[in-house]
Amino acid sequence: MAKPAAHTMQPLSEAAFETLPQMFWHAVDVRGDAVMMRQKDLGIWRSYSWREVGEIVADVAAGLAALGLQPGEVVSVLSNTSREWVWSDLGALTAGAVVSGIYPTDAPPQVEYLCQDSGTVVLFVENEEQLDKYLEVRERLPGLRRVVVFDMEGLAGFEDAAVMSFDALLALGRQARARQPDWLVARRTAGGGEALAVLVYTSGTTGRPKGAMLSHRNVLRSCLTLRAFLPATTVGERMAFLPLCHVSERIFGEYYAILCGAVANFVENPDTIFDNIREIQPDAFLAVPRVWEKMYSSVTIAVREATGLQRRAYAWAMAAGQARVHEAGQEPRLAPGARLKLWLADTLVLGNVRRMMGLNRVQLAVTGAAPISPDLIRWYMALGIELHELWGMTEITGAATCNPPGRTRPGSIGVALPQTEVRISHEGELLVRGPQVFMGYLNLPAKTAETMVDGWLRTGDVGRVDEQGYFYITDRMKDLIITAGGKNVTPSEWENQLKFSPYVTDAVVIGDRRPYLSCLVMIDQDNVEQWAQEHDVHFSDYGSLCRSKEVVALVGQEIDKVNQQFARVEQIKAFRLLETRLGAEDEELTPTMKLKRKLVNDKYSGLIESMYPAKVA
């Protein structure tokens, strides 16, 4: 892939739009033939200019209107992140529709619920596999009038009056535009900023997913707030790989990229993410903690396999990089000798490590959607990458706080974003008020009233704020553990420290109303398998790997390291390894790969009870 130099894109004028389609079409008018996005086809990167994407989006919008789509009706997209996802989203918004995303890992019953709850009338699906999910539940979705398929491979002989290809929709749109060339202008300017634009369903960690209603104003204020807060540097290249049905990628990856003019590079498929990072070398990179942890683990394992000289060079360079790590939120002043040592470390070692990871050009690195270990942020800082942790939720249309550029505090979620109020309630809960706070939950007025109190959003997160205005999350209101001895414990602090281990993917601390703390651990299969092979540990599958006494001892050593950082009452006294490899399609994990604490407690109750002495009758 031929990499252009990072560029500064002409900013859009906030006064020129009040809805998402108005912002997009303003960008098309301003940027014209500049590259908007790329996607790989058969090993070759295909670029699309703003003007080309505008033509496709116009055809999608006109095609949907020709199918009878009315303003305010709901269109859903069931697909992995791709150019077609964005085209469909922008086309539906241009036609005046509300757009909802469905995770491609969702099972047919979940697809049925989400389409039924949202009132979906048109469904875009990625391929035959996703189409089959609709076909399995179609009899219970009488309001869903049409299904549009992006990739028709395997469907050459398939005929169904309700199903059409994406290409057929584009052709229908071109015909409609030829008949009414001025139709598009009138349709895309209809409605206003307060109208519902996007439905984002919550991950369902505490029950069935709820449809968060986000207005055009919510989304635009969220994007404009980020633009005001983050550094006004080169925009350059970014990767599009997180699920677009999640609020993080939808806001930061699509709409914020449109506002700022970043070039979106769509990964080939979810399995090629790390190869694509090295190929693209993005200027801006947003990822969930699981991705940052995986990249750190890859470096750690690579260093262990390196020669003695290479290991010593890495250790020396990272020690020099520690000069960049600061706790007080102020960039440290380095003596001339330390600056020279840091320059040599970057030139000889750390730059190569960043290049190997695909992050040597990154100017804006962001983590969100789940807690991350402060030690991991310090590691990236020493490496030369300032990793900005931001905090928010679906109901805040993305972010409410973020660590300021140049003033990151590891362990903190940062300061309140512009035009955003954040405060701590008497119970310790973080409350948020601002223009990006959502309209409410679809079809759930009682739940909306419970969440919104006197104009403030109850986030459910427990936290604190320091004297400089930096906020810290200590746990979820519902996740606090009170041991049998009456000690309050915040399990996420311990869990985040353990996830810093290259051998651990996730963990759930147990201990509410119990005599001591225990935990369930999900291992990192790739790294543990490699360790087992290097140490002649025999195993036949994932389950036998977890049952191996050597692997259990390895994880026990990692737990002991973390225990040393906590008071005795907060230490883990027993643990078990989950012997089933979990993926996004499993009910124990949310689509953003977070373990559902309550479900894990219920599903593995027998395993949990084995860590506690039997009660005497």
Image (cartoon, rainbow, N blue to C red):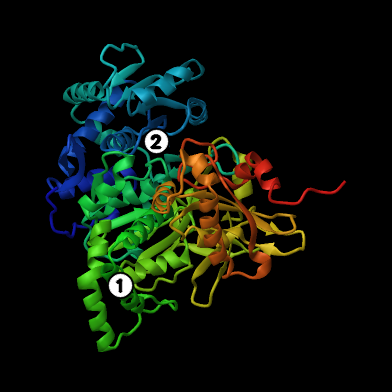
Query: Is residue 62 at all visible to an observer of this figure?
Result: yes
Mark 2 surroundings: few (<14), some (14-19) or many (≥20) residues within 10 A = many
x, y percent for residue 188: 29, 37
Number of the label disc, if any, that sits on residue 99: 2
Q: Residue 302 sits in which quadrant?
A: bottom left
Mark 1 surroundings: few (<14), some (14-19) or many (≥20) residues within 10 A = few
Q: Label 1, secondary structure: give it.
A: helix
- Closer to the observer: label 2 or label 1? 1
Q: Residue 301 sits in which quadrant?
A: bottom left
Q: Residue 235 sits in which quadrant?
A: bottom left
- In the figure, is residue 152 to the left or right of 583? left
Q: Residue at x 46, y 61 (%)?
A: 500
Query: Is residue 202 at all visible to an observer of this figure?
Result: no
Q: Residue at x 43, y 34 (%)?
A: 105
Which residue corresponds to mark 1? 312
Q: What is the CA distance from the residue labelled 2 to the residue labelled 1?
A: 53 Å
Q: Residue at x 39, y 79 (%)?
A: 330
Q: Amino acid at mark 1?
A: Arg
x, y percent for residue 397: 44, 50
Number of the label disc, if any, that sits on residue 344: none
